[in-house]
Amino acid sequence: MGTSTNYMKGRGAQVNPSNRFDKHSYETEMDIPQVLEDSAKTEYIEVYPKTMVNQVTSPDLPMDWSMNPYQGCEHGCVYCYARNTHNYWGYSAGTDFESKILVKKNAAILVEEKLKSKNWKASPILLSGNTDCYQPIEKKLEITRSILEVLWRYKHPVSIITKNSLILRDLDLLQKMAALRLVKVAISVTTLDEDLRRTLEPRTASVHSRLYTIEKLASNGIPVSVMFAPVIPGLNDHEIFKVAEYTSQLGASSLGYTIVRLNGDIGEIFEDWIRKNFPDRAEKVLNRIKEVHGGQLSDSRFGDRMRGEGNFAEIIRNQVQLARRKYFADMVVSEFNLELFEQLRHPQLSLF
């Protein structure tokens, strides 16, 4: 997998499509060694947005609000649906997405301003709904931790999704929040095959680290679920029961899933990637993806885009439901505590 001398190791995307908003595209003649050298560099660009907490309008997502400390993600997951959002910042969804990371240094300040707003009502916020809040640069910048500190101070609930074991750094905060039912964590597990993980998600935590993270969070009383996402037909769909069994034994409380969809430039990026890494089954995988999305690699239809349609999508859905009944039937998931934030904001209410 990825053994060609022209393959950019440590990156998921091997191409950098033109930004679809650019009126003109440019081709630069550059030798391959220079391209490979440049691909190893990651640039961090400070940005200062005016808002941080964004309303979620998609009916496919369980949360009403989300926030993203970073735009772009060095994890390099080749299938990532967030790649297309990089176009809005003037960059490509390909290698730019992995190597040009926009850093929101004022994120915690903006979150606090939102919580202090007289119109804000306690509602769980998803951290992050787009790019991973615990991607590698978080170890140095600690923006996600600063946001958690604000949320803890205001006793406000938050849901976290990540595929990085760096979340364990913040175990002290998470334990305190979990004790008051203010936090839930979802760990993304795409495969138990470390070789596949290494090429599919090159700069994410290893399979072993992710499983350890699930166990560590659960043993410390932090509600943790598993997102088997995305299911890529013909590539990792055979792992549904294994992932469910392993993670339930480690303390995970539930299992979620989505089916891969390759909208916008992601189709080109993924197709290039799979033909280079799995040439013997590239056609099978691509055709299976089309089969669950009405004959297309992409799918923007609410309801269908995350779960797919047709016989193969139904098989996947049935397997997930069976795995839930077999391995997670006795798990209890508590509801978020929304009252503490309101009591803190309006202490006089506690008198009644």
Image (cartoon, rainbow, N blue to C red):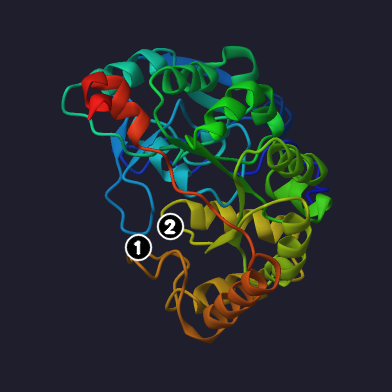
Q: Is residue 242 left or right of residue 286?
A: right
Residue 335, relative to residue 213: is it above or below?
A: below
> What residue is at 39 percent from the left and 53 percent from the top?
62
CB atoms of marks 1 and 2 within 8 Å:
yes
Visible residue check, residue 235: no
Q: Which mark is residue 300?
A: 1
For the residue pair 34 and 11, the one nearer the viewer reads as 11
Residue 119, relative to residue 281: is it above or below?
A: above
Which residue is farthest left? 119
Q: Which residue is mark 2?
A: 263
Q: Is residue 330 left or right of residue 212?
A: left
Kind of element beneath mark 1: loop
In the image, what residue type sits under mark 2? Asn
> What residue is at 35 percent from the left and 37 percent from the top?
338
The number of callouts visible is 2
Kind of element beneath mark 2: loop
> What residue is at 77 percent from the left and 65 percent from the top?
242
Q: Position of residue 283 (x, y in %)?
A: 65, 73
For the residue pair 111 and 200, the one nearer the viewer reads as 111
Q: Position of residue 164 (x, y in %)?
A: 67, 35
